[in-house]
Amino acid sequence: MQASGARSYARRMSTTSLATTAVGGPALPQERRLVTSIPGPRSQELLDRKAEAVAAGVGHTAPISAVAAGGGVVVDADGNSLIDLGSGIAVTTVGNAHPKVVEAVQAQVAAFTHTCFMVSPYESYVAVAEALNRLTPGDHAKKSALFNSGAEAVENAVKIARKHTGRSAVVAFDHGYHGRTNLTMALTAKSMPYKSGFGPFAPEVYRAPVSYPYRDGLTGAEAAKRAIQQIEKQIGADNLAAVIIEPIQGEGGFIVPAEGFLPALVDWCRANGVVFIADEVQTGFGRTGAMFASEHFGIVPDLITTAKGIAAGLPLAAVTGRAEIMDASHAGGLGGTYGGNPIACAAALAAIEAFENDGLVERAREIGALITGRFGELQASDRRIGDVRGLGAMVAVEFVDPATGEPDAALTGAVAKAAIAAGVIVLTCGTFGNVIRFLPPLSIGDELLAEGLSVVADALAAA
Ligand SMILES: *Cc1c(COP(=O)(O)O)cnc(C)c1O
């Protein structure tokens, strides 16, 4: 049924659209296939148009013109099939063009595309809120509100925390990333490329040191003590509305905090009436081998922000948390024209069903074991691999100069570039630009994943 749906879609598209249009989803041949160099001529044509038409500040990682994706591959306009180890930055976790998502979206788009939930409410929004309230850690009463992007969810979490506490200060952490809007730029640690020249930034945002075991050598308790002392001295708990942290830092380098760090922060927040916000925009939705990364650390955040993996590629984000905090805002204080758009909600409900029915959380753990196994082995013989870390299908390799232990961004960039040229999409990250991160779609097969990792290993050997 799905295959014939895809065929009729292909027929429809072939009569109405460019010859480059293809059908995605898991039915795509699951193979790495290079028929031109990267970029091929058709991709290059698009990149030339992009350079003319699109603002220079909007960059790209893989120099291709994507026309289809699914399973574990992205196909370009020249007919190259690249192995996808990035999921469009941890978004297509259930798989690109997942058949159930496609079906749900097509049904919804035919029924109605938008009413604005604040004008005429509809069921799918409420159902997504119910699902989030059920799936997020903790069995206390919870409520949710829906938005369009991770940054918007973070902004709203801060608004809610400020309204609830009547305080204004917010603490974020070294290496933290929370988005590109004004407030979330202020929360984000790294200047280039996220903040440089874009200030002035939102006030009342303070930064505390995080736990980065590979580089600071501190236990979780020591790192938490260091952070809490700084917060108490420099801000004062009475002025603090919220502490916001990614349970595993994403853009900052997939930094997994030492055991005990997050629970100590949560305890301190609770004792001081400070709202603890877990930004699970990247770590949420099965990515780490638990539905939420907070579960790995045994913490129950007051508020959780989600986006990226929540709706299989449609723009949707949420804040979920303790009902008494979520209800702090007066009616009309939260919302937005598109927040919780019905098409995005339909996609989210289908994606959540896939998580619960397809064993994807378990699959994330298997994928993680394959990646850490492979690079753990390599690390034993290649001292340029300083650290291999992560949880579930969120794994990173940190590259260093073996003589000094200093971050090696040049090597990292060269390996990523060579991997992409060889048909494997990988992303870099890290404050020092020396981390390659693996975020494969959970729909990727073992063989394709192994091949993708081999390509990256070969690129490293050749670098
Ligand atoms: C990507 C990301 C954001 C921002 O999400 P957008 O949808 O790009 O606005 C916020 N927080 C974290 C942890 C992220 O990874």
Image (cartoon, rainbow, N blue to C red):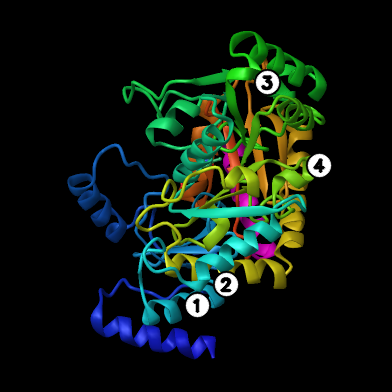
Query: Residue 60, how many percent across, how many down?
Result: 38, 45
Q: Nearer the viewer, residue 235 or 289?
A: 235
Q: Which residue is mark 2?
A: 350
Please state the extent of the stretch shown in magenta in the rendering: 444-463
Query: Residue 180, how many percent across, how many down?
Result: 41, 36
Of badges 2 and 3, the one in the foreground is 2
Q: Residue at x 76, y 57 (%)?
A: 366
Circle 1/circle 2 CB separation < 8 Å: yes
- Looking at marks 2 and 3 on the same chain, the residue that comes earlier in the sequence is marked by 2
In the rendered image, residue 445 lying in the magenta stretch gets the answer yes
Q: Nearer the viewer, residue 118 or 39?
A: 118
Q: Residue at x 57, y 64 (%)?
A: 128
Asked whether, in this view, residue 131 is left or right of residue 159, the answer is right
User: How many residues crowd mark 1 within 10 Å: few (<14), some (14–19), many (20+)?
Assistant: some
- Looking at marks 4 and 1 on the same chain, the residue that comes earlier in the sequence is marked by 1
Q: Which SS class for mark 2? A: helix
Q: Nearer the viewer, residue 74 or 13?
A: 13
Q: Which residue is mark 3?
A: 402
Relative to 106, say whether 154 is above or below.
Answer: above
- Looking at marks 1 and 3 on the same chain, the residue that comes earlier in the sequence is marked by 1
Circle 2/circle 4 CB separation < 8 Å: no
